[in-house]
Amino acid sequence: MSETQTTDVIVIGAGAVGENVAGRVVQKGLSAVLVESDLVGGECSYWACMPSKALLRPGTVLNAARAVAGAREAVTGAIDPQQVLARRTSFTSNWDDSSQEEWVESAGIRLERGWAVVSGEREVTVDRKDGSKITYRANQAVVLATGSTPTIPPIDGLADLDYWTTRDATSSTDVPASLAVLGGGVAGVELAQAYARLGAEVTVIARSGILGNYPREATDLVLAALRDEGITVLTDTATNAVRKEGGAFVLDVGDAATVTAERLLVSTGRHPHTTGLGLEELGIDAKKIRSDATGLVPDAGGWLYAVGDAGGRVQLTHQGKYEARMTADAIGARANGTLGDTAEDWSPYTATADEVAVPQVVFTDPEIAMVGRTLEQARKDGVNVSETSLPIAVAGSSLHGDDYTGWAQIVVDEDRKVLVGVTFAGPEVSEMLHSATIAIVGEVPLDRLWHAVPAYPTVSEVWLRLLEKYGM
């Protein structure tokens, strides 16, 4: 018979999103239990955002030095793969979460290491790693912050093979001689470039194009860069079957063609990790969860919340942490009776930016940085929009690197004369993205934005050129 205790909030999943929910509800005066079966800190800290960007950064820095006369002559060596892998490992604390565990304790959160099942209304049972069980009953809320899991395509032969997922690719202790990457999304393309720069012969196989959620002009710059670096990119190419021959992966692709590689990375998307939590027994379809803007799961009784990837809204760590802040505040407000079932857009309790102002970066070299809606998305949403775009060719870009190549676009709501979408593509353009995010979230009128003067000579001068071309 398991022990039973009571708390205000139970959070399942101690990744960045779950930590933010638990920490913030405690700040609101509520008690919280955080349940985790793996490393505290989650996917982003140990197998995604941080290690993948650590793998990419050395190559980007080296390429930037080679792009400037005077600096390129000083570059006499090549990347040291083992040093890159060692630096990557330092960012994961060698996959040791003791510092995160210390933070949880210092924040006044109770940590349970084990596997959680929602065993009833406002009730979670944890199978602890020591073999014991404990059941918690929540006075206020149960929050699912369980993240996502890779989506593996039903390709003949794949299920029986020892392929890599992104976890394996970001934690590998060596560099394969050759790598096939199945999937042309953000993670696949980033890791393809990282491993190519570490010395692997890389082939990317994409069912359609690469980076399909971004404007074509931006993705074309990335595609050209990948190919210039010797990466083979097969677009509009189906993978029909996979097998092993002599220790190598052999992929049957396209029309009777094959790709052979020492390792295979399957990076074909992710889906919310919400099954196996006992939700079905409560009449909740775990595969169709989409939380509302306060994080509340509709038709689940008013006590179940889902945030981050588990909420089915936006699969980005920074948006998940944003949702966590809003959800924690909503739980606190509902606990003290100051918030009802719904909340207004842009209030302290709603993740409204999820719908209209999501910033996202592809950390390839060149980068793509985008916030808000593309031209096509805005038109699909019924917005009367126009598009203005141009190459990034200003004094700041020419100083940044010889033969700098970039592209920028603004999407304007013509009825309100405000920006609803901005995209930059080029070396290190991610550092310009927050200005665009502020303009969209703040709904800054173009005639006021015209007075935001970019410093000279910086790459941000492209803002002036975009507005001039628009007609300001």
Image (tube, rainbow, N blue to C red):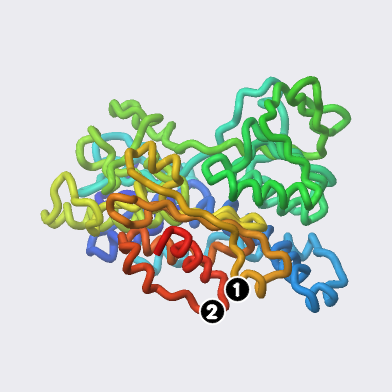
> Residue at left 40%, top 56%?
321
State which quarter of the image contains the N terminus. top left
At 35% from the left and 46% from the top, the residue drawn is 355
Residue 95 visible in the current orientation: no
The quarter of the rendered structure image containing the C terminus is: bottom left
Mark 2 burial class by Cα count in 10 Å: few <14, some 14-19, many 20+: few
Give the left or right position of residue 293, taking residue 385 as reference: left
Tell me where residue 150 sits by quadrant. Answer: top right
Secondary-structure class at tag 1: helix
Q: N-terminal of the two: label 1 or label 2?
A: 1
189, above or below 237, in the image: below
Is residue 161 or residue 262 the one in the foreground? 262
As measured in the structure, the alpha-carbon distance from the residue carrying label 1 to the one carrying label 2 is 7 Å
- Residue 308: x and y in percent read 40, 48
Q: Which residue is mark 2?
A: 456
Horizontal side of 150 relative to 118 (left or right) equals: right
Circle 1 residues within 10 Å: few <14, some 14–19, many ≥20: some
The numbered dot on residue 396 is 1
The quarter holding residue 419 reads bottom left
Left or right of residue 293: residue 103: right
Mark 2 secondary-structure assignment: loop
Where in the figure is residue 336, as x and y percent of width and height? Answer: 13, 57
Residues under numbered marks 1 and 2 in contact, where contact means CB atoms less than 8 Å apart: yes
Q: Residue at x 56, y 40 (%)?
A: 212
Please determine whether, in this image, residue 149 is positioned above or below residue 413. Answer: above
Please say if 437 is above or below 396: above
Disc 2 marks a residue whose amino acid type is Tyr
Q: Is residue 425 left or right of residue 433?
A: right
| Pick the front one: 220 or 238 | 220
Dividing the picture into quadrants, the one containing residue 78 is bottom right
- Mark number displayed over residue 377: none
Q: Amino acid at mark 1?
A: Gly
